[in-house]
Structures are given as structure tokens and as C-alpha cells.
Image: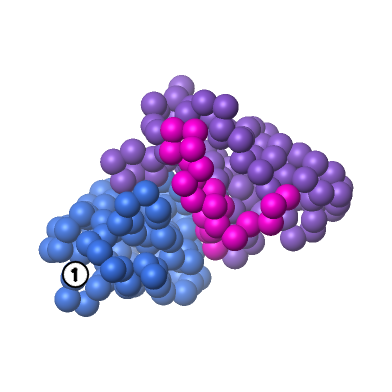
Amino acid sequence: GDSVTQMEGPVTLSEEAFLTINCTYTATGYPSLFWYVQYPGEGLQLLLKATKADDKGSNKGFEATYRKETTSFHLEKGSVQVSDSAVYFCALTTGNQFYFGTGTSLTVIP
Amino acid sequence: DTAVSQTPKYLVTQMGNDKSIKCEQNLGHDTMYWYKQDSKKFLKIMFSYNNKELIINETVPNRFSPKSPDKAHLNLHINSLELGDSAVYFCASSQDEKLFFGSGTQLSVL
């Protein structure tokens, strides 16, 4: 069945460090891929998405490229800020059902 | 103004009680969901409704019963609460492959 695997956390970085959170997927069809972010005490919100191979999603300095050959959608940011501290979820959908990874907690220290 | 709103935000109750969580969305979406998030942030789909019809019903105890009086509302009723039901419950709606989450209901069963 369809599934998403993302790197375990927690991840702790200093401000302005480079961030990578790995995500790989398994899907029978042609999924759309997403990164959602959850700030403390809030629900998840869409960070970025990509709908087909080689698409790059980007938002708020975060980027992820849909790599069909490696079935990956790694999240990157060149310079993290304290305000980026949150839990990040990789997800996919091939229809009405969404599949989420286990979440990666990121803490950015000043 | 809130797109997906759920109440209450916090719910503390004794084992064996029956409780309900309400959810409303003002986005005009046809599909709504209930997710359960455990203490490790793992997100699990419970139910999905499309235009008031149940389309996803994952392996959830039958003590959990969703009710959709109209396509803007999806309430969750839980009978005979157990300690293991303690979690954060999120309502969500979707359109065009985007999920919109409520801010969550933190349920604590004592």
C-alpha cells in the first residue's frame, strides 16, 4: 500500500544552519507530495506541495523536489530561524486519502 | 473567520464517560476527516466523509461514531472513554488535494 517514511527526530540546529529532512515514499499510482508543518498547540498547515516528477515546491525559504527515480521528497532550507521550530510532516495522496509520515520535530536554538 | 473550527479545545474527563467533539468548516469543501495524534505526534486517519457519506473508516473501536448532519459539519462522539483514548483529535477538510486542519482537541481521560 501507499506509505511515507521520513527521518526520525528530534533535530536540533543553531540559527542560520542548513536543514534537510529526508522523506521517501511508496505509492502504486502517481501521487502528489506535500510537506505540512505543525507549530506548537496548532493544527497542521500546508507548507509546500509538488504534483509531478521534477516539480519543486517552495514556500517561506523551504524547498522540496519530487524525485521519481529515488521516490524522495526531501525538505531543505538554507538558513533556519528560531521561528521554524515545529514538527514537519511529509505526506502523499493519490486520491481522497492522505498518508502521513511520522513527523520530524525541529528545534532551532539562537 | 476560522476555516476549520473544532470545540472544545481541551476536554478532561473520567474513564467510562461519553463525550463529543464538534467540527465545522466554512470553506465549502465536500470532504471532511477526523485524525488522531498520539503523544509521539503520529497522525492516524480515523474517518473520512464526502458530502455527508462515510468513505473511509479505518480500524477504530466502534465506541467512536462520527456524525455528519450536513457537509459543513463532522462531529465525533466517543462512548465509554478509555485511558488509551487520550490524544489530540484533529478535524480537517480538503479540496484540490489540500488539507485544512482545525487547531485540535486535546482529550485527557483520567
Residue A90 place in picture, x, y as percent: 37, 61
Name the foreground residue: B69 vs A65. Answer: B69
Specify few, some or many for label 1: CA neighbours under 10 Å numbering under 14, 14-19, or 20 or more.
some
Name the foreground residue: B91 vs B78. Answer: B78
Please give left or right for residue B26 compared with residue B60 in the image: left
Give the magenta part as a residue range: B41-63
The residue depicted at 69 percent of the width and 40 percent of the height is B77
Residue B12 place in picture, x, y as percent: 79, 44
What chain is colored purple?
B
Work out whether A99 lies above or below A22: above
User: What SS does tag 1 mark?
Assistant: loop
**Which quadrant holds residue A4?**
bottom left
What chain is colored blue?
A
The residue depicted at 63 percent of the width and 57 percent of the height is B60
**Which quadrant holds residue A22?**
bottom left
The residue depicted at 15 percent of the width and 63 percent of the height is A53
Work out whether A69 lies above or below B93: below
Please give left or right for residue B84 compared with residue A26 in the image: right
Dot 1 corresponds to which residue?
A: A67
Residue A10 place in picture, x, y as percent: 50, 70
Residue that lies at the very extreme toward the bottom in this rendered image? A70
Name the foreground residue: A35 vs B93. Answer: B93
Name the foreground residue: B64 vs B107. Answer: B64
The residue depicted at 39 percent of the width and 40 percent of the height is B94
Work out whether A57 lies above or below B7: below
* Residue B74 seen in this snapshot: yes
The amino acid type found where label 1 is placed reads: Arg
